[in-house]
């Protein structure tokens, strides 16, 4: 489990395609070597397993499902990614519960600057929009953020969207500080919302049968 509090931005050094999977190598100053092979690291919000230590960082496998659902398949050497090691038992939950299981990708529609902060306007897939609520939590490229506003689709062809505010710390310490309009971002909605929906649907089905 992760918290969405990014520890560092790492640099992609290699993305080797292996048929329907890939092998990703990342340079980082985080003490990954202190964690055993098999430990988890969130890479721009995607939970990956360390399969090899290198002097400068680590290597992880990326499966077909991850390549199809996230932005990792589009990475090239030199790109930067948000990194967070798994939260230890008894650690502080400073952000929110983040599993590293990306639900889909959104697109940055606009950046609205403030004096020391910025608002990101992000388009969200229709099937994920119902899980996004004002003042609720969402992970964007692995960064725990609070939803400011939600705009539902006005027409079938429109896409719903939401906004989040980025404080100076987030702008400086994560890849969102330099993300361009039009760029895709990994989204993980609040897992509690997904379970509530599933449990409610199951209860409704039982009532209908009764």
Image (cartoon, rainbow, N blue to C red):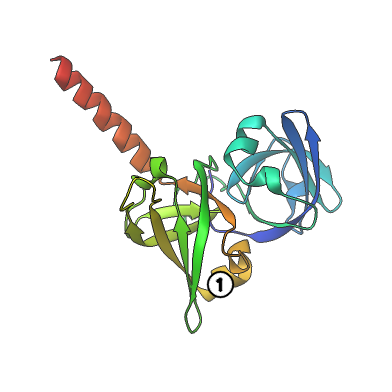
**Residue 148 is drawn in which quadrant?**
bottom left
Q: Is residue 145 above or below residue 70?
A: below
Instruction: Judge by depth and name the residue closer to the eye, 118 or 126.
Output: 126
Residue at the image position 33 percent from the left and 51 percent from the top: 153
Q: Residue furthest right?
A: 55
Q: Which residue is mark 1?
A: 169
Between residues 88 and 7, which one lies in front from this camera angle? 7
- Can residue 109 be seen in the rendering of this structure? yes
Q: Quadrant of residue 83?
A: bottom right
Q: Quadrant of residue 46?
A: top right
At which x and y percent is residue 27? 79, 54
Residue at 30% across, 53% down: 154
For the point 57% across and 71% down, which residue is it? 171
Quarter placement of the C terminus: top left
Label 1 crowd (10 A; few <14 / some 14-19 / many >=20): few
Residue found at the far bottom of this picture: 115
Residue at image x 43%, y 64%? Answer: 164
In-front residue for pair 64/8: 64
Q: Residue furthest left?
A: 210
* Percent coordinates x, y for residue 144 in the rendering: 49, 57
Provide the secondary structure element on which disc 1 rests: helix
Q: Is residue 95 visible?
A: no
Number of numbered discs visible in the structure rendering: 1
Point out residue 193 in the picture as x, y percentages from the top left corner. 34, 42
């Amino acid at each position: 489990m992760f918290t969405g509090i990014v520890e560092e931005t790492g640099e992609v050094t290699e993305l080797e395609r292996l048929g329907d999977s890939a092998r990703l190598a990342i340079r980082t100053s985080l003490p990954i070597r202190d964690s055993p092979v098999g430990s988890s690291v969130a890479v721009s919000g995607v939970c990956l397993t360390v399969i090899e230590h290198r002097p400068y960082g680590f290597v992880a496998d990326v499966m077909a499902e991850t390549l199809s659902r996230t932005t990792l398949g589009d990475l090239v050497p030199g790109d930067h990614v948000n990194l967070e090691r798994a939260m230890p038992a008894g650690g502080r939950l400073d952000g929110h519960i983040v599993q590293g299981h990306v639900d889909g990708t959104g697109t940055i529609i606009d950046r609205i600057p403030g004096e020391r902060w910025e608002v990101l306007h992000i388009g969200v897939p229709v099937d994920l929009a119902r899980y996004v609520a004002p003042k609720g939590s969402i992970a964007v490229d692995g960064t725990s953020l609070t939803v400011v506003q939600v705009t539902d689709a006005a027409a079938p062809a429109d896409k719903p969207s939401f906004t989040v505010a980025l404080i100076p710390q987030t702008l400086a310490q994560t890849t969102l500080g330099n993300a361009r309009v039009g760029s895709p971002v990994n989204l993980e909605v609040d897992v509690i919302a997904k379970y509530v929906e599933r449990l409610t649907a199951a209860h409704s089905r039982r009532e209908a049968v009764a």
